[in-house]
Amino acid sequence: MDPILFKLALGGMAVLGCIGLFFGIGLALAAHKFAVEVNPKVEEVLEVLAGAQ
Amino acid sequence: MQMKKKGVLFPVVFTIIGIFFLAGCGSEHRFVKKTAFKDANSIVIEFAGPVDEEWAKNSGNYSAFEKPDPDIQLKVKNIVLSPDNRQVTLVFEDDLNSKEPHMLTLNNISSEGKSLGTAILSVKKIYLGYLFSILIGAMIINNFVFSKYLGLCVFFGTSQKKSTAVGMGITFTLVMVVSAMMSWFLYQFILVPFRLDFLQIVVFIGLVSLSVQAVDTILRKVNPALFKAFGVYLVLVIANCIIIAVPLILADSNYNALESLMLALGAGLGFLIALFLMSSVRERLELATVPPTYRGLPIAFVVAGLFALSFLGFSGMTIF
């Protein structure tokens, strides 16, 4: 195969990986910063319910 | 609730108007005040001071071409100088295509015996009007729902009540603008330079879900009341195909930042208009006597078809 294609593919993986990592970290930070405290009882009650829907 | 919405909307509108004014300013050469198209085959150049008649009448000093075709030089037929020597009208042999910007070169402008250097100018229609025409075009003339038939599932799903329709429309516009601007930026400055533009769909889908997730996370904390009003629609936005169509159109037609903003805003507002119109009719349909076979979705499709027909009346319209 043409080495240029390999270069393109590897470069693409690297670039898209970087973009993904960047936005992933960004989202994680945002989720951390804008975290909303949820009453733990809500989860407990949901656990007990049947939860078909 | 009503107050909150107003408080958000006004700064946004003012910022957009401000950007418009900024975009309208700026000239490329200090001695040239204004360039504009006139009639079908003329360009008018206004200078800040009087130019020498000898220089102005020499057609060798002017060269002009359409921006996409630099090798086709346009032939100047006639040059008209105004009595105060401040305005030159170039009349070309053929009609000009004023939809495309034209590049105009003025060699060695000479005024009162002094040379003021060469000016390379671009002549185009008023940019503000162009931007406005993109906005109106995406909003009404080429409405994404009624003339491109995109985003129909969400359109029928959320147009049963006026309140849900407006909520969905506003949420959609917000996410649309955010994600379209991000994908425009990534496409122009990352995908194209690295020759990865064949991956555009993958990247755009990722960006749409990213912006939905980001708006969801941030809004939940910053404005819980608005978040509750948006509710499920925020997640539904991902399932809408207009939101992926707009970045693809932007990538295809090489728009710049402001033009992209206008197209995204137009697409969002167009969807809002479509939803509002549809929900107004469907609220009335609840009270109408519809034959049992047509009740619900079938009659909604018939109504949407009628809307599409009436929107056909806008087709072919051009503004500015």
Image (cartoon, rainbow, N blue to C red):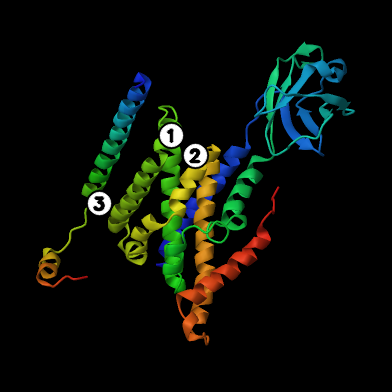
Subunit ID for the residue under disc 1: B
Q: CA distance from mark 1 to mark 2?
A: 9 Å
Depicted B186 relative to depicted A40: above or below:
above
Q: Where is residue B232, by image quadrant?
A: bottom left
| Pointers 3 and 2 in contact (C-beta within 8 Å) | no
Dot 3 amino acid type: Phe
Dot 2 amino acid type: Ala
Subunit ID for the residue under disc 3: A
| Pointers 1 and 3 in contact (C-beta within 8 Å) | no
Secondary structure under tag 2 reads helix
The residue indicated by pointer 1 is: B197
The residue indicated by pointer 2 is: B251
Q: CA distance from mark 1 to mark 3?
A: 34 Å
Q: Which residue occupies the extreme front position in the image? A: A1
Relative image position of residue B15 (x, y in whole percent): 51, 47
Dot 1 amino acid type: Asp
Q: Which residue occupies the extreme bottom position in the image? A: B289
Relative image position of residue B248 (x, y in whole percent): 48, 44
Subunit ID for the residue under disc 2: B
Q: Residues within 10 Å of mark 2 (few under 14, many from 20)?
A: many
Answer left or right for B171 relative to B311.
Answer: left
The residue depicted at 67 percent of the width and 33 percent of the height is: B101
Is residue B203 or residue B15 the one in the foreground? Answer: B203
Q: Where is residue B124, by image quadrant?
A: top right
Relative image position of residue B68 (x, y in whole percent): 65, 29
Question: Is tag 1's residue or tag 2's residue first in the polypeptide sequence?
Answer: 1
The residue depicted at 67 percent of the width and 23 percent of the height is: B70
* Residues flagged by tags 3 and 2 on a common chain: no
**Residue B56 visible somewhere in the drawing:** yes
